[in-house]
Amino acid sequence: MLMNMNALLETAVENHFAVPAFNIGTCQFLNGIIELCEEVEAPVILAVHPLEQNFQRESGMAAVLKAAHNARVPVCVHLDHSGIADIVRAIRNGFTSVMIDASLMSFEDNVDMTKQVIKIARPLGISVEAELGTIGKNAGAAEEGTKDIIYTRPEEAREFVERTGTDTLAVAVGTAHGIYPPDFRPQLKLDLLSEIRQSVDVPLVLHGGSSNPDEEIKEAVRRGISKVNIASDIKYAFYKQLRRTLAENENMIEPFDIYPEAVKAMQQAALHKMELFGTVGTAQLYHF
Ligand code: CO
Ligand code: CO
């Protein structure tokens, strides 16, 4: 069942679990994630980055919306890290949630941009995520980010939420997009997260949670993170297996022969995250 982010996260906040946002880069990810979530009765956010929207085009987005509509579990279709043009395109494509990422702009410009998007989205019942502070970026990650993380300040978060009326807030508490290099040790500032949690009353979002230690992520959920973005971890699992399958079967050319093992590996990585977030089995908590 298709719903917006507010409806999806309300139950998560009440019951202290987090919903994963998995990036949908191809239809193999779409079908694999929906199949898994129905199997384990988990709500899910299908996240599409603007570059993924470009790549899959309107027909691909129609498939994402159709799958969300038909799913036996709660599903939100959400646009990841965007500017206005991509947001308008996603709204036309039927998305129920969008993220305006003006986090690299000044605080005032971030407030203005977020307000502009809310003015467009709210009358349509589309929820809005904004970002304050900057999430780091690792090599290979498509998403925006900075080399050095600018941490979200609790007092700024409060002012930002009050002035914009954003539905959810992505915070920078020490994660970076992508898979971390071997010498990089991510440091999640859990105390800062708790302070931010006390300062604002909207659901909080963690980006760049790939390859942070499991215990750290679990603790972040316990301290009030309601949505965790997962892109790199499932892509890594999928393409690692795909490379293996292709290397071991030089003459294989049928997509229905090539992809199933990669989808299975991706599903395993996704399930592991859902277990950490406490999402498994929670579809039953939704009333629709
Ligand atoms: Co992100
Ligand atoms: Co990540």
Image: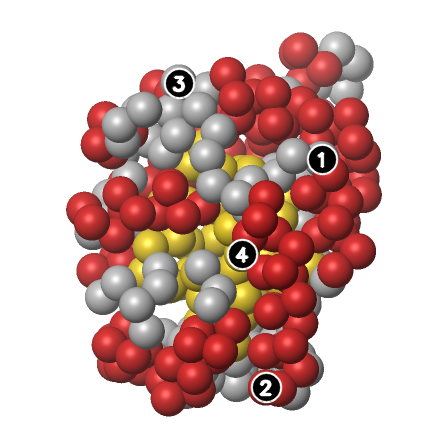
Residue 68 on image: x %, y %? 53, 26
Residue 72's tag is 3
> Residue 135 sits in which quadrant?
bottom right
The CA distance from mark 1 to mark 4 is: 16 Å
Residue 87 on image: x %, y %? 71, 52
The CA distance from mark 3 to mark 1 is: 21 Å
Task: Note whether residue 145 is visible.
Answer: no
Contact between labelled residues 2 and 3, with CB atoms less than 8 Å apart: no
> Residue 159 sits in which quadrant?
bottom left
Determine the residue positioned at 33% across, 31% down.
Answer: 42
The C terminus sits in image quarter = top left
Residue type indicated by callout 1: Asn
Q: Which residue is tagged 1?
A: 93
The CA distance from mark 1 to mark 2 is: 30 Å
Label 3: few (<14), some or many (≥20) within 10 Å?
Answer: some
Marks 1 and 4, the one that precedes in the sequence: 1
Residue type indicated by callout 3: Arg
Q: Is mark 3 within 8 Å of ligand 2?
A: no
Residue 264 on image: x %, y %? 49, 25
Residue type indicated by callout 4: Val
Q: Which residue is tagged 4?
A: 128
